[in-house]
Amino acid sequence: MSGEEYHVPVLAVEVSELFVSGGGGVYVDGTLGGCGHFRAIAERAAALAAERSSGVGPAPVVMIGIDRDGEAIERARRSSFDGIGARVIIEQARFSEFDAVLGKHSIEKVRGLFVDLGVSSRQIDEPGRGFMYMKDAPLDMRMDRGGGVTAAEFLERCEEEELTDVLKNYGEVRNAPRLAGAIKAYMRGNKMETSADLKNCVAKEYGGRFDIKLLAKLFQALRIRVNGELAELRTFLDKSVTCLAEGGRVAVISYHSLEDRMVKDFFREAEAACVCDHSQPVCTCGKHIVLRRVNRKAIMASDEEIKRNSRSRSARLRVAERVFAPLLIRKRTL
């Protein structure tokens, strides 16, 4: 199975055009998947490096691909990257651990950091992963099946209060206590091992014609909790500022409001300078600009792309560039 079949890259053209800014250098794809974005980024970087070469040859391009899914890593290692114009490094790790991968290869600064936070098409469609509520499968939901707690195990171990918090904070479920209570009550007399079990539980509580969006929110909440997705995203964003070279860019494709809001707020805060009270004559906060947003509004898929790949409908792309601005000093107005 080719990378294209494995996972259709969302917003691939937009990513390569907005994310790759300087040609040569080190680029990290923290969610390698089927290598679609990886290849597009490498080809764009190599092309720009060739265009800007000064007669001594183009600046080298190094592509680092990271994924927590061992199956994705094995597929990538069996793939051919001939002709993309870059040195390729493939490592299995969480995308929040990209700095450890850089350290392993004695790399301090990178030209770009990219993550696509969506679940790959193959993971969604593969029996046994449990990501899809439309198909009966074990309630696993782990990105990396090599360890960690499955969704079924979490539901078995958690208290009703904790489940309520997960549904409210990660799924934005309206009246989360009702759904959490229904799930725990159902589990006292029934097994909860498959997506069909969970769907039957919801149908019992809300009736057979309940809003399908409720299931989507429920599965989203469990997947985020099982994989620690929001905490991992926050860690990635915090580390990105330290590891990006000047002019380097960080790009994130998100698929729901929780992720997108976190990225948007992080970029906005990193773009802001002094936050001292305006009545204060001299800056004492020490805050300075570290990122500049490349696109002020999130980039979304075109109607044509959505027709080709319906899963691109909810994608949101945000890109920011590393800057080193001088500290803003407030002066007293006389």
Image (cartoon, rainbow, N blue to C red):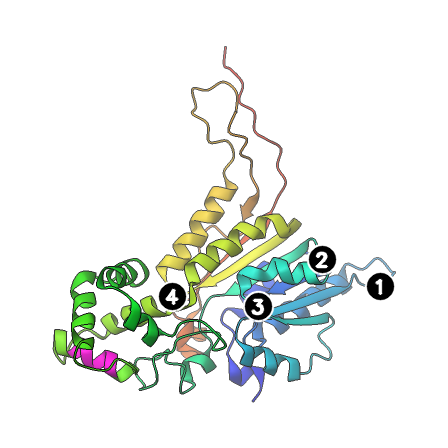
Assess disc 1: are there few (<14), some (14-19) or many (≥20) residues with their C-alpha within 10 Å of its C-alpha.
few
Mark carried by residue 224: 4
Helix, strand or loop at mark 4: helix
Query: Which quadrant of the figure contains the N terminus?
Result: bottom right
- Residue 176 visible? The answer is yes
Disc number lying in front (4 or 1): 4
State the CA–CA distance, disc 3 to disc 1.
Answer: 33 Å
Is 312 one of the magenta-colored residues? Answer: no
Q: Choose top left, top right, bottom left or bottom right for residue 309.
A: bottom left
Q: Specify the amino acid type for callout 1.
A: Gly
Picture residue at 52% right of the left edge, 53% below the top: 237
| Residue on which the image places disc 3 | 93
Amino acid residing under circle 2: Ile
Q: Are marks 4 and 1 in contact (CB under 8 Å)?
A: no
Q: Circles 2 and 4: CB distance less than 8 Å?
A: no
The amino acid type, in three-letter code, at marker 4 is Ile
Mark 1, secondary structure of its residue: loop
Write the residue at 51% across / 79% down. 7
The residue lying at 43 percent from left, 63 percent from top is 229
Q: CA distance from mark 2 to mark 4?
A: 30 Å
Question: Which residue in the rendered view is the most extreme toward the top?
Answer: 334
Q: Which residue is mark 1?
A: 57
Give the quadrant of residue 324.
Answer: top right
Which is in the foreground here, disc 3 or disc 1?
Answer: 3
Residue 314 placement (x, y as % from top left): 38, 67
Classify mark 2: helix, strand or loop: loop
Is 309 left or right of 19, judged from the image as shown? left
Range drawn in magenta = 197-203
Position in image of residue 304 (x %, y %):
44, 74
Residue corresponding to mark 2: 107
Residue that protrudes farthest toward the right in the picture: 56
